[in-house]
Amino acid sequence: MGAAGKAPKARREARVKMWVARASTTVLLWTCVVLLAAAFGEHLAPSVLGGVWSGCLTQTLVIVQRPLLPADGERVAAAATAAVALPPKRIYKNNGYLMVSCNGGLNQMRAAICDMVTVARYLNVTLIVPELDKTSFWADPSEFQDIFDVDYFIASLREEVRILKELPPRLKRRVALGYLRSMPPISWSDISYYHNQILPMIKKYKVLHLNRTDARLANNGLPMEIQKLRCRVNFAALRFTPEIEELGRRAVKILRQNGPFVVLHLRYEMDMLAFSGCTHGCSNEEAEELTRMRYAYPWWKEKVIDSNAKRKDGLCPLTPEEIAMVLKALDIDPSYQIYIAAGEIYGGQRRMAALTSAYPNVVRKETILPSGIRFFQNHSSQMAALDYMVSLESDVFIPTYDGNMAKVVEGHRRYLGFKKTVLLDRKLIVELVDQYKNGTLSWTDFSSSVKASHTSRMGTPSRRQVDATNTFITETRLCECLK
């Protein structure tokens, strides 16, 4: 072949080599971009990737902060919504993914969520939005997003922990095929347990599922930063859905228009009495019905219960008759509204007669919002969320039993400025009630004793107390987070 024929062939070979080099370079660059984006997705947001990673380079996101409920009884008129810039995302090496299933009622699950967010933060793992209990006594089918504002929950905590609504597709497929390690963590463990035993499993399996997550993180002996984060999750990040908040505002507005109101967390529902074995004031038929119910639930471990002994030890919720006496002894004005934050009272009007006779303005969410709650009925957690909002805003909050809602609301009211919360000494009260009823104590002495014994139990500031075994807090105290 002549020189003239060789020149075009050489040029073609040169062009091919050039295009191969360009293609290789392009593939290499794209590979680098993808790897960098996967590793540093919290910071990179290349528009060429179709917006898979939200980032701070080209996008400005805001959280719309809804106005808080009024704290002093007067509505904040036409409060403008404030646009708050999202906090910066936290940068950390992701050690894996944590899935959690909460158990119990609304406030039991709420406390568990606070613990699991804190655990995820200090293990440097990605938290999947928690799954709520649908198999408890209440059988509420509500998902997390049906009760809480899930987008606000994720965004407000993004400088602490990465939270996703679901697992990435690859890991989701593995879980669907059954490749998932699931276990309940040990109760009342400190953060070292999660570092030493839980974190290695997350690194090994990539995804770990923790179930029955109530009371799994200790209350005492933890760094202040951990305690503050728990409080922040509880009092700021866990905000109810707009629908629940709007209905809560309506309920509070109606109550305030009619004057001062006391929220009475009256734990006298059938399941509470069956579980606790407290039958004081019940008929023989009712006591037998409650006993049958207790035996019907195998996970309620305690079966044979001495109701009288338990009551004298202050371990039973106060009855409607007993709480009516306490309200009168504390000089609660009979014209005040008494809002019942509870389910259906066992015994109905017969058991409520003493309370409604002393306080005619007894109301419930069903009476002040007869049409508004129809969409929430048969969803006990959403109904409990309404009671929670009204409880926060009441002039006085009085729980008759120290369950999860009583503790969480008391702590939240302390955080909001030590709002008046009467923490009843049930052991002393039942003793005084019995003395008054058998004629050994006059009404004047009864009232004076109730007042004197509760002067320091009104939700005022006091030193944090720990029991002798250092396993739980005997009195809830203000969290100093977000101050």
Image (spheres, grey):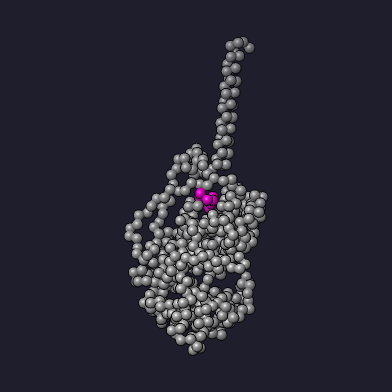
* The one of 440 and 86 positioned closer to us in this rendering: 440
Q: Main secondary structure of the magenta part?
A: loop
Identify which residue is drawn at 60% across, 20% down: 13
Q: Is residue 321 left or right of residue 277?
A: left
Question: Can you see residue 462?
Answer: yes
Image location of residue 67, percent across then percent down: 39, 57
- Give the residue furthest to the left: 77
Q: Is residue 176 above or below residue 406?
A: above
Identify which residue is drawn at 51% across, 42% down: 43
* The one of 118 and 250 positioned closer to us in this rendering: 118
Find residue 367 and report its image quarter: bottom left
Identify which residue is drawn at 47% across, 54% down: 152
Quadrant (top left/top right/bottom left/bottom right) for the N terminus? top right
Point out the stretch of residues depicted in magenta.
Answer: 158-166
Q: Is 165 a magenta residue?
A: yes
Identify which residue is drawn at 43% across, 48% down: 85
Q: Is residue 126 left or right of residue 442?
A: right
Quadrant (top left/top right/bottom left/bottom right) for the C terminus? bottom left
Q: Is residue 355 left or right of residue 295?
A: left
Find residue 336 and report its image quarter: bottom left
Image location of residue 455, percent across then percent down: 46, 73
Question: Can you see residue 342?
Answer: no
Q: How many marks?
A: 0
* The one of 415 and 84 positioned closer to us in this rendering: 415
